[in-house]
Amino acid sequence: MENFELDNYDRKIIKELELDGRKAYSAIAQKLNISNTMVNQRVNKMVENGIITGIKPILNEKKVGYDWGAFTGLTLKKDHDSEKVIKKLEEIPEITECYFVTGSYTLFVRIIAKSHEHMREILYNKLDHIKGIQKTDSIVDLGCAFKRNITL
């Protein structure tokens, strides 16, 4: 995969969109003292090249009733079954992230739940019934200190 070379304007446009993804291109253009067309073309080029993968709302999970979070390591019976397991994990809406990892686990997932009973239900009645998962190991999430994009 070829890297896309970002220049100063690209970085500044990204910075503005990170502050407010709904900001009008005209407002970004005015702030950066460039044309609307330039902003539009650059954003489109960054989308086409996979630099910007979407502009979407970021939910505050606690405000919508999901007070519990956990990071769970999954040990699979056979690592080559990961594709099948991932398809099943995607069917569980409370699993919001899934990563391939090295070390003791094959996959690492983030789970959100409304209560400890809900978390137990997800772990025991959903995760534990997925064919191919040998073992799970969960760490309770006590809150996010910060989450950010890489600084460009």
Image (cartoon, helix red, strand yellow):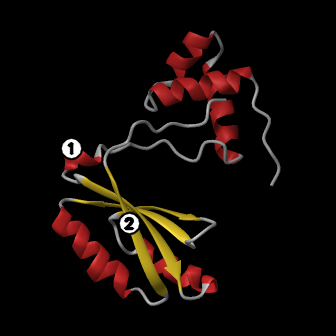
In the picture as drawn, the residue positioned furthest to the right comes out as: 2
Label placed on residue 74: none
The vertical placement of 56 against 122, above or below, is: above
Q: In screen coordinates, is 125 left or right of 42?
A: left
Q: Is residue 113 above or below residue 44?
A: below
Question: x, y (%) of residue 143?
Answer: 32, 44
Measure how far apart labels 2 and 1 are at the Cα level.
Answer: 23 Å
Is residue 12 or residue 34 the one in the foreground? 12
Asked if 53 appears above or below 8 in the picture, the reply is below
Q: Amino acid at mark 2?
A: Ser
Residue 125 locus on image (x, y percent): 27, 82
- The N terminus - image quarter: bottom right
Image depth: mark 2 or mark 1 in front = 2
User: Could you tell me which residue is drawn at 64 percent across and 43 percent down?
Assistant: 47
Of callouts 2 and 1, which one flags the residue occurring earlier in the amino acid sequence?
A: 1
Badge 2 marks a residue whose secondary structure is strand
Which residue is the site of mark 2?
138
Which quadrant would the C terminus be assigned to in this image? Answer: top right
The numbered disc on residue 63 is 1
Kind of residue at disc 1: Lys
Between residues 39 and 151, which one lies in front from this camera angle? 151
Name the residue rendered at 28%, 73% in the picture: 122
Q: Residue at x 44, y 72 (%)?
A: 90
Residue 9, quarter of the rendered image: top right
Direction from residue 70 to residue 12 in the image, left or right: right
